[in-house]
Image (cartoon, rainbow, N blue to C red):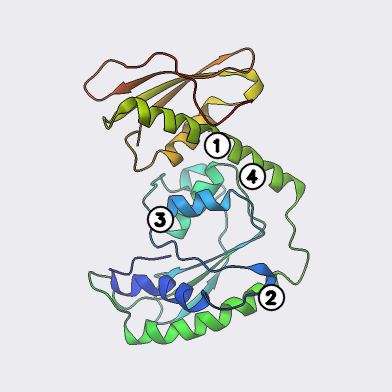
C-alpha cells in the first residue's frame, strides 16, 4: 500500500512490485492496492488466513529503518479511527474490518521509516535500500506464520460469511439506486427487506457505506423497513434538491 506520488510513501508499492513475480509460501499472493483502502477491506472479506501489510510507517527511527509490527485491536471503540473509505492507513483498513466483524487469524505490518513524504515520485536512497530487506523478510515471515495450521476457525469463517451477506445485498441495492438516480447525487435510500434475509439495520447501513464510496450514493443514509417473508425491494431514493424519487423496482442481485 502507499501513494507513489508522495515520495517514500511509495515504499509498499515498490515492495509489492518486486514480489509480484516471486513464488511465495503457502499460496500467498502479492497485490498493490495503492491508496484504495476500501477495496482491500472488501477483498479481505472473501476469507483469508492472514495478511501482511507493507507501508511507510513513521515511528521516529532513522530513515530506512524496517519495522515488523503486530497490530493490537483497541479495547475502547472510541480509539477506532473514523471511517474514511479513501484513507489507506493500516489502522483505518483494520478498523474497517472490525466494523464489519471480520477477524483475520493474524495480521503483520512491515513498515519502513520514510525520509521524505511530500509531492514527488521516487524513493529516497535509505528507503530504496530498505526495499531489498522487505523483499527478503516477506517470504521468511510467511513461512514462519504458515508453519502451523493456517486454517481459520469456524467462528472466523462465520463472521466473514455474515459480512459478505450484507455486502452482496448492498451491491444489488446500489445497482438499482444508480439506475434510478441517473447521475444525480443520492442523499437517502429506503429499502424493504423480508425477515428471511436476516438483515440488521446498522450492518446494512455500514455495508452500504462501504460499497457506495465514490459513487452517486456516497454518504447516503439508509432506512431499512423489515417485513415478514422474502421481500427485497428498493422503495425510494432521495436525491439532492429533491424530496424523493422512485416506486418499487425489484432490486437485482438476490433471488432468494
Q: Which residue is mark 3?
A: 36
Q: Are marks 4 and 1 in contact (CB under 8 Å)?
A: no
Mark 2 and mark 4: Cα distance apart in space: 24 Å
Could you tell me residue 49's position as x and y percent?
67, 59
Helix, strand or loop at mark 3: loop
Query: Which circle's residue, 4 or 1, is located before the other in the chain?
Result: 4
Report the number of numbered marks. Answer: 4
Q: Which residue is mark 2?
A: 143
Mark nearest the camera among 1 and 2 is 1
Q: Residues within 10 Å of mark 1 (few under 14, many from 20)?
A: some
Which numbered disc covers residue 184? none
Residue 83 appears left or right of 134: left
In this picture, is 39 found above or below 22? above
Residue 41 appears left or right of 177: right
Residue 23 appears left or right of 181: right
Residue at x 58%, y 29% (from the top left corner): 254
Mark 3 and mark 4: Cα distance apart in space: 20 Å
Q: Nearer the viewer, residue 12 or 235?
A: 235
Which numbered disc covers residue 160? 4
Q: Nearer the viewer, residue 9 or 5?
A: 5
Q: Are marks 2 and 4 in contact (CB under 8 Å)?
A: no
Q: Quadrant of the C terminus?
A: top right
Query: Which circle's residue, 3 or 4, is located before the other in the chain?
Result: 3
Helix, strand or loop at mark 4: helix
Could you tell me residue 182's position as x and y percent?
29, 29
Q: Which residue is mark 1?
A: 168
Amino acid at each position: 500500500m502507499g501513494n507513489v506520488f508522495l515520495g517514500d510513501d511509495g515504499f509498499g508499492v515498490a515492495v509489492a512490485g518486486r514480489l509480484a513475480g516471486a513464488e511465495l509460501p503457502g499460496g500467498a499472493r502479492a497485490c498493490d492496492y495503492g491508496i484504495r483502502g476500501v477495496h482491500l477491506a472488501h477483498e479481505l472479506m472473501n476469507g483469508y488466513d492472514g495478511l501482511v501489510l507493507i507501508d511507510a510507517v513513521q515511528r521516529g527511527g532513522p530513515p530506512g529503518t524496517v519495522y515488523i509490527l503486530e497490530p493490537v485491536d483497541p479495547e475502547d471503540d472510541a480509539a477506532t479511527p473514523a471511517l474514511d473509505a479513501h484513507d489507506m492507513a493500516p489502522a483505518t483498513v483494520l478498523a474497517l474490518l472490525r466494523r464489519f466483524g471480520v477477524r483475520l487469524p493474524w495480521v503483520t505490518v512491515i513498515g519502513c521509516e520514510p525520509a521524505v513524504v511530500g509531492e514527488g515520485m521516487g524513493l529516497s536512497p535509505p528507503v530504496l535500500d530498505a526495499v531489498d530487506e522487505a523483499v527478503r523478510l516477506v517470504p521468511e515471515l510467511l513461512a514462519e506464520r504458515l508453519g502451523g495450521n493456517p486454517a481459520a476457525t469456524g467462528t472466523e469463517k462465520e463472521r466473514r460469511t455474515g459480512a459478505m451477506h450484507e455486502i452482496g445485498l448492498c451491491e444489488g441495492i446500489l445497482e438499482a439506486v444508480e439506475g434510478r438516480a441517473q447521475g444525480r447525487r443520492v442523499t437517502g435510500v429506503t429499502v424493504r427487506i423480508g425477515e428471511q434475509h436476516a438483515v440488521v439495520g446498522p450492518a446494512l447501513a455500514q455495508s452500504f457505506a462501504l460499497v457506495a464510496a465514490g459513487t452517486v450514493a456516497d454518504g447516503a443514509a439508509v432506512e431499512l423497513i423489515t417485513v415478514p417473508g422474502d421481500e427485497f425491494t428498493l422503495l425510494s431514493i432521495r436525491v439532492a434538491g429533491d424530496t424523493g424519487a422512485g416506486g418499487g423496482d425489484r432490486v437485482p442481485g438476490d433471488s432468494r
